[in-house]
Amino acid sequence: MSVPVPRRAVLRGAVLLGAAAGATAITQFGNHDAQAVATRVDQPDIANCATWSARPPSTNVSVVQSRPNKIIVHHTAFPNTTDYSLAQAYRNSRDIQNLHMDTNGWLDSGQHFTNSRGGYLTEGRHGSLYALLHGQTMVQGAHCVGQNSQAIGIENDGIYLDVQPPKALWDSLVWFCAFTCQQYGIASSEIYGHKDFNDTQCPGLLHARLPELRSAVAARLGG
């Protein structure tokens, strides 16, 4: 059985190189995130598309030859499952891809990464994990109108209009955002919600917690 990509097994040299470049870039923002130079965030386990049996894209994904400048947080608006297993995380990733390809008519999953209610991270659109680990390019997504070529989109499974996400999901989101900020040189202040850019309720109550998320990410980065 396939397992998620271990945090130190995949492209370790590239990760270290990307982390060093990311830390240098963070200092350019001139805020407390500059302290990230002295603090390394380990790579969380992220299951690549092959691991969760993703369908191939209908056409080639587009690669943007520059770094993203922000992270956008989403919720899937799927029912809040009580199955927190890894198997459910993989099923959820397939359900999202099927919806995006078969109903929305997109070439692949719209988001770059997905976070399950059990706190398991998966790659969304093909090529997103490779780009993240190298830290120099990004795959163009389809998660937020006007931001798809400059923002990393992460879907958090569930609907959070009147309930909070599970702790496992929240903790995983903090770790993922901190690692992504490190890899791409994104300041923790550049973490947003979908509704900041489009007319939507997404990501529900997670939006009100963005200041908490930014602070938690800054702390992980050493700020």
Image: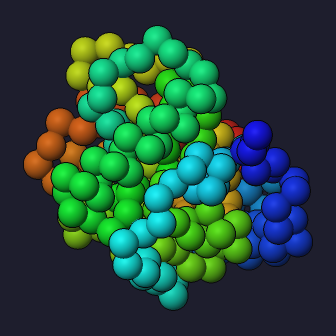
Which residue appears farthest toward the left when viewing the image?
Answer: 199
Identify the residue at image location x=81%, y=48%.
6
* Image quadrant where residue 1 sits: top right
Q: Is residue 83 left or right of residue 120?
A: left
Q: In this view of the protein, can residue 99 be seen by the observer?
A: yes
- Indicate the quadrant where residue 90 lies: top right
Q: Position of residue 158 (x, y in %)?
A: 36, 27
Vertical comparison of 64 with 90: above or below: below
Colour convention of the picture: rainbow
Task: Residue 159: give x, y in percent of width and height.
Answer: 30, 25
Q: Is 137 drawn above or below residue 56 in the view shown? A: below
- Residue 8: % across, % down: 87, 54
Between 117 and 213, the one nearer to me in the picture: 117
Judging depth in this view, the residue of 139 and 218 nearest the camera is 139
Judged left or right of residue 93, residue 20 is right
Q: Residue at x 34, y 36 (%)?
A: 75
In the displayed structure, 183 sits above or below 80; it is below
Q: Is residue 150 above or below residue 83?
A: below
Q: Is residue 84 left or right of residue 73?
A: right
Farthest residue in the bottom direction? 65
| Quadrant assignment, res 77 | top left
The residue under the point 38% across, 57% down is 109
Q: Count every numbered label the image shows and give the total.
A: 0
Instruction: Give how far across and how far down residue 113 sits, in percent.
Output: 50, 51
Foreground of the two, 107 or 132: 107
Q: Residue at x 32, y 37 (%)?
A: 76
* Residue 207 in sight: no
